[in-house]
Image (cartoon, rainbow, N blue to C red):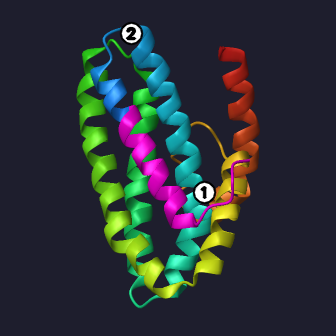
Amino acid sequence: MTEPMNAIELLEDQHQHIRSLMSLVGEAETEQVRKRAFDQLRELIAVHETAEEIVIRPVTRRAFPGGEQVADARMAEENEGKSVLAELEKLDVTDPAFAKTFAEFRAAVEEHAQHEEQLEFRALRDHVDGESLDKMGQRIQQAEAAAPTHPHPAAKTTATNALLGPFASIADRIRDALAS
């Protein structure tokens, strides 16, 4: 596990890493580099979104006025993203459909990250004390360590992610080990 970090700082750092990986996937000159970058991106997004859904969304729902609507909107964006990521995972990175779908996915992920940073994270900073944000950062790291590494579009709610996540994680990590 990495050094403890404030939840918002941790998630914003991960957003930057996701942006870097999306650039690498989009600009890779070889199939091997694109595939490796996409696999890293897919895993990071899967664990990142699962942790947000389990740790951040419940706090967002109760921490500030309008939090319920903010959380619902982010969940809807994430659920759409899971579906597209699962579709991308089935495509060969050299397939023209991959490039087209990935470009649309990249734009949607960027828009989602901006919504989180500008609407959700800003409000959480204003309404949640620093000690609580630090504890949430630790919980995010714990959730990510046990989170699935592939998208699971059927897991559409915080409760579903918390309940099914550990089982999906085991299956995903076995799948990853067999693929390498």
The amino acid beneath tag 2 is Glu
Q: Is residue 158 left or right of residue 75?
A: right
Picture disc at residue 51: 1
For the residues bearing labels 1 and 2, Cβ distance under 8 angstroms: no
- Residue 83 seen in the current view: no
Say which quarter of the image contains residue 98: top left
- Residue 51 seen in the current view: yes
Q: Position of residue 84 (x, y in %)?
A: 38, 39
Q: Magenta includes 11?
A: yes
Q: Position of residue 138 (x, y in %)?
A: 70, 62
The amino acid beneath tag 1 is Ala
Crowding near the residue tagged with mark 2, few <14, some 14–19, many ≥20 C-alpha atoms within 10 Å: few
Residue lying furthest bottom in this view?
Answer: 65
Specify the segment rendered in magenta: 1-21
Task: Identify the residue shown where x is 68% and y is 33%.
Answer: 172
Which type of secondary structure does the marked residue at label 2 adopt?
helix
Q: Position of residue 16 (x, y in %)?
A: 40, 46
Picture disc at residue 173: none
Could you tell me which quadrant the C terminus lies in?
top right
Q: Magenta includes 25?
A: no
